[in-house]
Image (cartoon, rainbow, N blue to C red):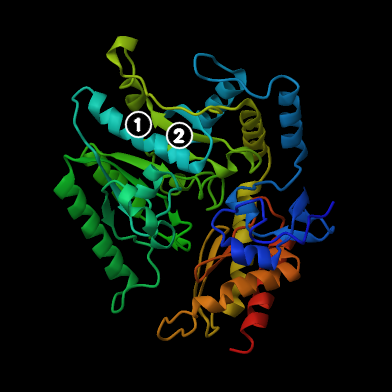
Amino acid sequence: MTHDSRLTTTRFPVWHPFTQMQVFVEENPPVIVAGEEFDLIDDHANRYLDGVSSLWCNVFGHRVPEIDSAIKRQVDRISHTTLLGLQSDVSIELAQKLVSVTPEGLNHVFYSDAGATSVEAALKIAIQYHAQKERPQKRHMFVRLSDAYHGDTIGSVSVGRMETFHHFYAPLLFETINVPSPGLSPLPQGQTRQTFYEDCLQQLEQAINRHREEIAAVIIEPIVQGAAGVFVHPPGYLTRLRELTTQHGILLIADEVAVGFGKTGTLFACQQENVTPDILCLAKGLTGGYLPLAATLTTSEIYDAFLGPPSARRTFFHGHTFTGNPLGCAAAIATLDLFATRPVLEQVATSEQILQDKLSPLIGHPHVREIRQKGIMVGIDIVKNKATGELFDPSLRQEHAIVREARKRGVIIRALGNVLFLMPAVAMPSELVRQLAEVTVESFTHVMRDD
């Protein structure tokens, strides 16, 4: 089956996310009709290696027999039933599994349907918790890191503002406290990584001390800020943040939507520093990248603050139609079972080294400012002038030209601003990770050869 290539911008039926549709329609990207293992297949039977894991969510590849079978079995039973006033066996089973594999102390699971909605739930839970805890407080502020991204609902945008995405929506957003990202790169002129890190810690501590009676929570993408360009935090920052928030009775929200499920080398990024947040947000890889399902996990202390007779109005008045969807839960259970039975985390360590080695020819390139990496998360920072940091004229779309060249060579990668992203599936075999890196270098070199 082929699509109608005569469609124009005005007649094009699908409005794509984060996409300038005028250019998109002119370029006529592939129409994906199938997938097999780690490949995407278009309507002309062309195959493409999925080098961004279908927007950072695919874990074990496409058409994974165990996940396919789990969904099919669930379809034969029931595809959806509400959790408002009823229970479902698969939502209970998944919650038990999540509690068993996440950092100790996260004992309760609230379901939603996407990363942004898991964060939105976390923000509301934090505000209501402080109002209903044993010694109630009216805490309404959130601390966020610069260049953070937590989703595109109004609440998640408020705590994760990225100027490129969100400047139009400023009138809709609530006030937050912004502190510098310790992973910021490149560094401000004249600062070393150590002095900048110390400055970040100082500003964090000052902000918390100044507003400690108003802050409900600090929200962070632990270890790595993904959409910012793969900003990797120095070791110890998450631990120190946990110490500060505990000291002042402030909740710590860990948004592991992008970094969770193995991408950094541990199942969850918080585990790299043995940190248990008060609230943990999960999505993307939760279902192996199959279905929209998210989870917001909390401690029993938070959960207990919402208990009481209905007349007390302590209920968490928040929900979604497809909360705890049985198909999504079935896929997630199968995904966690695969993590338990396959050596995928060991594969991440191997893939990390392959990516580092095979991308190394770009390190000295005059148009590569730096390559940032943690686990299988890679951001290649592209500039026109390495010495000055000057970027290419956006109208040239140099980064997108590299994406298109890679696509011609059978590999899907993605650019955001001046950063080129590689994010292979967690379980991608070594030979395919090697192919992904080699094609990226070839495509970059081809596009930049005249510069």
Asked if the residues shown at circle 2 and circle 1 are in contact, with their CB atoms under 8 angstroms apart, the answer is yes
Instruction: List the residue tagged with mark 2.
Output: 296
Residue 330 appears in the picture as rendered: yes
Would residue 169 be found to the left or right of residue 353 on screen?
left
Q: Please, is residue 229 above or below residue 77 in the view?
A: below
The circle on residue 125 is 1
**Residue reaching furthest bottom?**
450
Secondary element under disc 2, as helix, strand or loop, is strand
Q: What element carries label 1?
A: helix
Q: Where's residue 28, x and y in %?
A: 71, 64
> Which residue is at 75% across, 41% downward?
64
The quarter in which the C terminus is drawn is bottom right
Which image quadrant for residue 406? bottom right
In-image side of 321 versus 155 (left or right): right
Three-letter residue code for mark 1: Ile
Q: Residues within 10 Å of mark 2 (few under 14, many from 20)?
A: many
- Horizontal and vertical percent for residue 297? 44, 32
